[in-house]
DNA sequence: CCGTGGGCAATACAGGTGTATAGTCGGGAG
DNA sequence: CTCCCGACTATACACCTGTATTGCCCACGG
């Protein structure tokens, strides 16, 4: 360990003060947002002086950019390693990712609402993955490149990301942080339960009737619908 | 019109400078967050001086509280009026809500990630509504008060709210703002498509197998799973 | 008529923020 | 040893933010 980013899978060279600052910035940005985080707070959390933060990263924006790069690098690193070991299809891999990468996910979630370019890129990758999944699984229902699969994939990415962006409220209601390793599975099983039941509802006469009214009504963020 | 909040359904007395300030604050808070919004920016957007903002709302926190109250009031007002007119079950009502209350939804979404008490209360109401819906529709699958329905309802609220919190990314990918009246139906139909298909997947042997591994894996915010 | 209070604006002030600059310390190269 | 360069610190500065203070202006009641 040492670097908050990973589980000891980072080169020792990265454990310098510069890396400590970047890790502290990651936490502050994830917790307080790009605007709320302060350079002095980051410096204090990293145990260094304010000047050193500026010595390594010239400006706050550059520091944020470095955090963005570090996060996407860490994600790509884990995904490729998992792909190499064939763990990608393994159930429990995503649970592990949730458990070990809670900070990365929180950072990405906050960056998504703050609107960083890297977060937008990640969101786009998520939608691309969802689009691929949908088109491969139901080619006739979601023709590749169609507007329908594009809409569905975007909404899917937004909904799944929403469980991370709003993980604080989930933690409040569930009593435990769903990004902790030991509880990482709960929202996953809850999502499957939800999909099974709401899928039933969507294909029921009621759901079909609703969908048929093309003037259509959108989702209800609440419960009914 | 006059007040950004509603479609002219607010008392004239509310169209004072005080109301203009509150409406401008609503926009600023929704756009830049509680920390990013500035009193001077609000005053400028409202076309008044900084002193007047402070004259009507003593502090920034009090102004935010007033915005919270106004938003929940507006929502309750519309919901009760729709209930009185029997529009609640009508398809298209939620579309109308999305179309006319885009600002309110954006404000609530931002307040949810910023962590205001009112937003937490709204989130709790959403989960309560979802819990009620799930327990009524599938009483044996989601026994009232069970941990299972609590988890599912919380995740459902988070996912549906996610489409609003991340509506900016949705707008970027779809090319149009889903909170605009004319496109309000797209994410709704996309969600139904998604539920129909992912529900099929969740009840397929693959989905059941995944769910069976109780050590479980959580959701994939990306695509597969 | 006056004066009195509230909507409204201008300004002042203290604290925090990002940034720039000067300075200290230590270890390697000549 | 001397020099020098990079890590590191301390301080200063300009700006922005929320808040407090003061005063203007005008309608309204005596």
Image (cartoon, coloured by chain):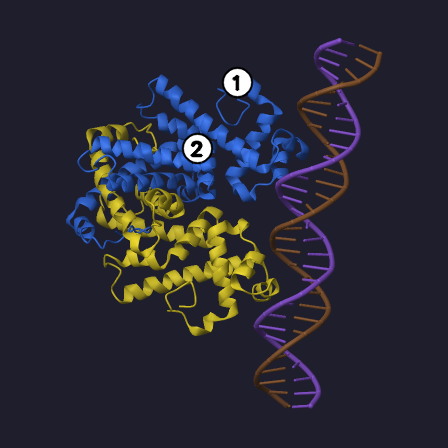
Chain colours: A yellow, B blue, C brown, D purple
**Residue placed most toward the observer, D25 or A82:** D25
**Nearer-N-terminus badge (1/2):** 1
Q: Does residue B177 show up? A: no
Where residue B64 appears, as percent x and y from the top left, is: 54, 35
Asked which secondary structure carries label 2, the reply is loop
Query: Badge 2, how many Cα within 10 Å: few under 14, some, many 20+?
Result: some
**Residue name at image x 37 percent, y 48 percent:** A164
Camera-nearest residue between A35 and B178: A35
The residue depicted at 23 percent of the width and 59 percent of the height is A90
Looking at the rendered structure, whether the residues under marks 1 and 2 are on a common chain is answered as yes
Q: Position of residue A114 (x, y in %)?
A: 49, 48
Against A177, residue D18 (above or below) is above
x, y percentage for residue C19? 64, 58
> For residue B75, which quarter of the picture?
top left
Residue B11 got which mark?
A: 1
Furthest-left residue in this view: B205
User: Which mark, by number, is residue B180?
Assistant: 2
């Amino acid at each position: 360990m040492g670097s908050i980013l990973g589980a000891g899978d980072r080169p020792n060279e990265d454990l310098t003060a510069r890396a400590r600052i970047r890790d502290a910035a990651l936490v502050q940005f994830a917790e307080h947002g790009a605007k709320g985080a302060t350079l002095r707070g980051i410096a204090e959390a990293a145990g260094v002086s304010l000047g050193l933060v500026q010595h390594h990263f010239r400006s706050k924006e550059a520091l944020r950019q470095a955090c963005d790069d570090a996060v996407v690098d860490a994600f790509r690193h884990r995904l490729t390693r998992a792909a190499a070991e064939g763990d990608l299809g393994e159930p429990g891999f995503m649970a592990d990712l949730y458990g070990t990468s809670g900070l990365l996910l929180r950072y990405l979630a906050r960056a998504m609402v703050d609107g960083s370019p890297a977060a937008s890129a990640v969101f786009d990758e998520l939608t691309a993955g969802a689009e691929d999944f949908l088109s491969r699984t139901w080619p006739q229902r979601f023709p590749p490149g169609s507007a329908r699969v594009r809409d569905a994939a975007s909404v899917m990415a937004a909904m799944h990301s929403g469980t991370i962006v709003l993980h604080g409220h989930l933690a409040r209601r569930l009593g435990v942080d769903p990004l902790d390793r030991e509880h990482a599975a709960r929202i996953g099983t809850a999502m499957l339960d939800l999909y099974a039941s709401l899928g039933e509802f969507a294909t029921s006469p009621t759901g079909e009737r609703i969908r048929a009214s093309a003037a259509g009504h959108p989702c209800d963020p609440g419960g009914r619908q």
